[in-house]
Image (spheres, helix red, strand yellow):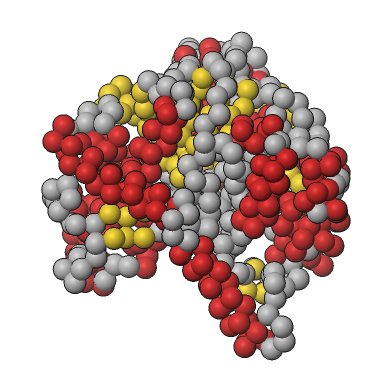
Amino acid sequence: MSAAPGSGRENESYVVGVDFGTLSGRAVVVRVQDGAELGAAEHVYPHGVIDEALPAGGPRLPPEWALQMPSDYIEVLRRAVPEALATSGVPAERVIGVGTDFTSCTMIPVTADGTPLCELPQYASRPHAYVKLWKHHSAQPQADRINALAAELGEPWLDRYGGRISSEGQFAKGLQLLEEDPELYDLTDHWVEATDWIVWQLCGSYVRSACAAGYKGLLQDGAHPSEAFLAALAPGFRGFVRDKVEHPTGALGTRAGGLSARAAAWTGLPEGIAVCVGNIDAHVTVPATGSAGAGRMVLIMGTSSCHMVSSAEPSPVPGMSGVVDGGIVPGLWGYEAGQSGVGDIFGWFVRTAVPESCAREARRLGLTLHDHLTRLSAGQAVGEHGLVALDWLSGNRSVLVDHELSGTVVGLTLATRPEDVYRALLESTAFGTRRIIEAFEEAGVPVSGVTLAGGLLENTFLTQLYADVIRRPLSLIRSSRGPALGSAMHAAVAAGAYRDIHAAAAAMGGVRHDVHEPDPDRAAAYDLLYAEYCLLHDYFGRGANDVMHRLRQLRRTAVSTSAQTVTGGTPPASPPL
C-alpha cells in the first residue's frame, strides 16, 4: 500500500513501538513528526503467566513462582506488528525504526546463540529452564542473603537500591538458579533480560540495555558487585557476572542493530531499519508524557505500578528500586519505586471473592465486575465501609522491599459487602503511592507534580481517589499506550530523526494537565484512614509482628508435605527437576 500522491504522507516517516506486558504484547505505529498513533494491535500471550504447572507436564510449581514462554513474545512480533501496520495504512517502506520495552526484571536462561533452555526438548520439564517473569518472587531467600552480606560488608552499591535489593532482580533470580538447578545454571551461557533478548531476536545483536542493567543488574558507575562478594554468597557464583551477565551495554535511544531478514519476515517491516536498544516498560513511558525533566513523578498504573522521578543529583532514598545515572533520560539520575500489585489485586478480588449474585447483577446491567463494583463503591462516603487494607498481596516492592509480606483487610464484619472490600483495596494502593511519595521527599528528592499513565486510567473514580489521597492535582498522559509510544519515540532517536529523547518527547509526547484536583473534604477524611494504614504498614512491615513471614513458611511446609503425600518420598526443598 502506498501513500496517495499529493496526500502529504509520501514524505512522512514512521516508527513502531512494541510493549511487552505481563499478559500481552501491544504494537503501535507512530508518526515521527508529531507522535500521532495511527494503528495499534494487541496479542494476548497464549500461555499467559505460568504459576501452577509447566505446559510440558512436569511438576507442580511451588508458591511465588511466575514463569512465561518466550515463544509467546515472538508471536507478538508475528501478529501484533503486522496487524498494527495494516490498521494504520502506513506504507511499510516509510517505517524507519522499531523500539521495544518489557516488564522487568524478566530473565531468560539461554545458550550461546540465544536459544532459551525451555525450548530444548530435554529441558522442557525443568522449571528453571523457563522465563522468570518479573513477579516471580520465590527468590526472596536469596535476596535476603544478598542484602545481609552487602550490608555487613558495606558494599557501596547498596545505597543506590534504597538499602535492599528485590527478589525480582537479576542477581537473586540467578543465585536461585545456581542453588536449585546447578546443572541448568552451568548450561546457561547468557542470563538475559527479556528486553535485551527480544532486541537480539530482532537484529541478531545482543546488546544489554543500560536501563535494565542499572536498575535490575546492579551495574553502577561502570561496575557490578565484585567476584569476591559473589563467591562469599556461594562459591559457584563467583563467575556469575563474567560468565553469564557481562556484555556490551547500549545507552537508551541508541541503535542496537538493523532489523534482520528473519525479523522483517515476521513483522512486515523493512529489513535494515533501526532497532533501538531495549527499555523497561515503566521507564520508557516517562518521555511519552511530553516532558522528561526533573521533579515530576510519572506513575504508571497497571498490573503493578511504578513511580518514576528524575533528579539532577543522586540521593539515597530508603526502599527505592534503584537510582541510575541516565536510567530514564540522559543527563539526569532516574529513580524507580513501585508497588508489585495494583491491577493484579483488583483482578484477584473479582476472580475469587465476588458472590454469584453480584456477578449476575453486573451481567444484567451489561457491566464488567470491575465497573459494577466501582459504581457501587463510588456512592459511599470516605470511611463508610469501616475498612483499611494493606496493598501487599504480591509483596511490597517499595518502601519495605519485602516480597514475603502479604495483604490484609482490617474491619471486616458480617455486614461487609463486596463493594466495601473492593473500595478498600483501591484505597490501599493509593495509600501505598502516598507512602512512596513521602519517602522520596523525606530523603530530599522533591516531587513537584504527578502524571498518571497506564491501563488503569480508564477508571476515573480510581484516579480521582488517588488525587484525594495524595492531596495533589493529577495530570494524565495523552496516549492510552504510553510504553509503546515511548518505545516508538526512542526508535525515532535511534533512527536519527531527533537528536535525543528530550527533543522527541517535546514533539511526540503529550499530557492533559491537572485533570483531577483533590477534594478538600475527601482528602481530610482520607488523612484519617491513611494514618491507620501507616500504623499497619509499620506494625507488620518493620518487624513489630512477623506473622506474615511465619505464615509464608507454614504455607511452604504444607505445600511440600502435600507433594510428599501425593508422590511419596522426601518433600522437595525446591522444584523437582
The image shows residue 223 at horizontal and vertical percentages of 77, 30
Q: Residue at x 68, y 33 (%)?
A: 157
* Residue sitting nearer the eye, 218 or 507: 218
Viewport quadrant of the C terminus? bottom right
Is any atom of residue 52 visible in this view?
Answer: no
Coordinates of residue 512 in the picture (x, y in percent): 32, 23
Q: Nearer the viewer, residue 273 or 58?
A: 58
Q: How many marks?
A: 0
- Compared with 305, 177 (above or below) is below
Residue 73 vertical placement versus 443 (above, below):
below
Residue 224, horizontal then vertical, whole percent? 76, 35
Which quadrant: the N terminus?
top right
In percent of width and height, residue 436 lies at 42, 37
Q: Residue at x 78, y 57 (%)?
A: 178
The answer to which of 511 and 160 lies nearer the viewer is 160
Q: Is residue 223 left or right of residue 19?
A: right
